[in-house]
């Protein structure tokens, strides 16, 4: 086995692709889910209980995060990698933005990462090895109209990553952030056909990415092949912002 990794939001989209990619490369993986219990249990059954475990986690609840990650740690043992991929979107124009939508997105996309890192970083620094990959978005780099809450959460995630990389680097822990563009997931499935066509025209590769492509980058950043990479923002957007 290459090591033990925890992936948040591992039952769907990019998170699920990451779980599959890591298992293919001989990692043991614990992942969290919230609403997708049947998909989570089916994934564990498919990939094998000796290689994968899961726990339900509510991103808005620090207590739930500690409980879920603690349960996964107990099953896996020492954790060498953390992938923070869970998150939500509640798009609204800034003028119409409800306070609840702002707070909800910040809590789920940013505060949950803080809690997860607080929970798992001590074990990594004690072992003087570890790798954290935070999944942000190009929205946090360039901004997107109607996504002030989402963009703010992802931009803050980039700042958190860079600060953590400076603190944890001397203790043997690498921290990087991946900023995908438009990826074919449940999150982009709700976009209108006209909007999708407009975005595809702006993307150099003339298509949305797929979760498997993002998962390969995450796996690389976790691996020893990326042993001299930390504090970096890796953009994977098909040339949209290039």
Image: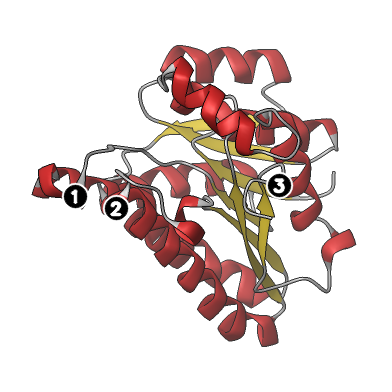
> In the structure shown, which secondary structural element does the residue marked by tag 2 occupy?
helix
Q: Which circle's residue, 3 or 2, is located before the other in the chain?
A: 2
Label 2 crowd (10 A; few <14 / some 14-19 / many >=20): many
Whether pointer 2 and pointer 1 mark residues with C-beta atoms closer than 8 Å, the reply is yes
- Foreground residue, 215 or 92? 92
* Colouring convention used in this rendered image of the protein: secondary structure
Precedes in sequence: disc 3 or disc 1 = 1
Q: Position of residue 192 (x, y in %)?
A: 41, 19
Viewport quadrant of the N terminus: top right
Mark 1 lies on residue: 94
Q: CA distance from mark 2 to mark 1?
A: 7 Å
Task: Identify the mark at residue 218; answer none if there is no mark.
Answer: none
Horizontal side of residue 204 vs 158, given as left or right: right
10 Å neighbourhood of mark 3: few (<14), some, or many (≥20)?
few
Q: Position of residue 143 (x, y in %)?
A: 42, 55
Q: Secondary structure at mark 3?
A: loop
Q: Is residue 97 left or right of residue 185?
A: left
Q: Identify the residue at horizontal 47%, vertical 16% (top origin).
A: 193
Q: Are marks 3 and 1 in contact (CB under 8 Å)?
A: no
Task: Where is residue 21? Give x, y as percent.
Answer: 76, 33
- Counting from the top left corner in percent of width and height, residue 84 is at 52, 50
Q: CA distance from mark 3 to mark 1?
A: 27 Å
Q: Which residue is mark 2?
A: 148
Q: Write down the quadrant of residue 110 in the picture.
A: bottom left
Q: Write the residue at 11% across / 42% down.
A: 96
Q: Which residue is mark 3?
A: 239
The quadrant in which the C terminus is found is: bottom right
């Amino acid at each position: 086995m290459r090591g033990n990794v925890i992936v948040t939001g591992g039952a769907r989209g990019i998170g699920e692709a990451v779980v599959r990619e890591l298992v293919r490369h001989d990692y043991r993986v614990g992942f969290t889910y919230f609403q997708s219990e049947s998909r989570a249990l089916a994934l564990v059954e498919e990939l094998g209980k000796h290689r994968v475990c899961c726990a339900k986690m509510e991103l808005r609840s620090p207590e739930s995060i500690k409980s879920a990650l603690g349960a996964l740690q107990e099953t896996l043992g020492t954790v060498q990698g953390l992938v923070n991929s869970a998150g939500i979107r509640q798009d609204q124009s800034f003028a119409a933005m409800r306070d609840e939508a702002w707070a909800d997105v910040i809590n789920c996309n940013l505060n949950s990462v803080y809690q997860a890192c607080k929970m798992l970083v001590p074990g990594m620094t004690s072992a003087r090895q570890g790798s954290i990959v935070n999944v942000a978005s190009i929205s946090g780099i360039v901004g997107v109209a109607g996504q002030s809450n989402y963009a703010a959460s992802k931009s803050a995630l980039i700042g958190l990553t860079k600060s953590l990389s400076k603190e944890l680097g001397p203790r043997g822990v690498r921290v990087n952030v991946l900023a995908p563009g438009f990826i074919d997931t449940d999150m982009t499935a709700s976009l209108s056909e006209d909007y999708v066509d407009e975005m595809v025209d702006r993307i150099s590769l003339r298509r949305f990415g797929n979760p498997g492509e993002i998962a390969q980058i995450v796996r690389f950043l976790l691996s020893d092949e990326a042993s001299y990479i930390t504090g970096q923002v890796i953009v994977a957007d098909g040339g949209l912002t290039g």
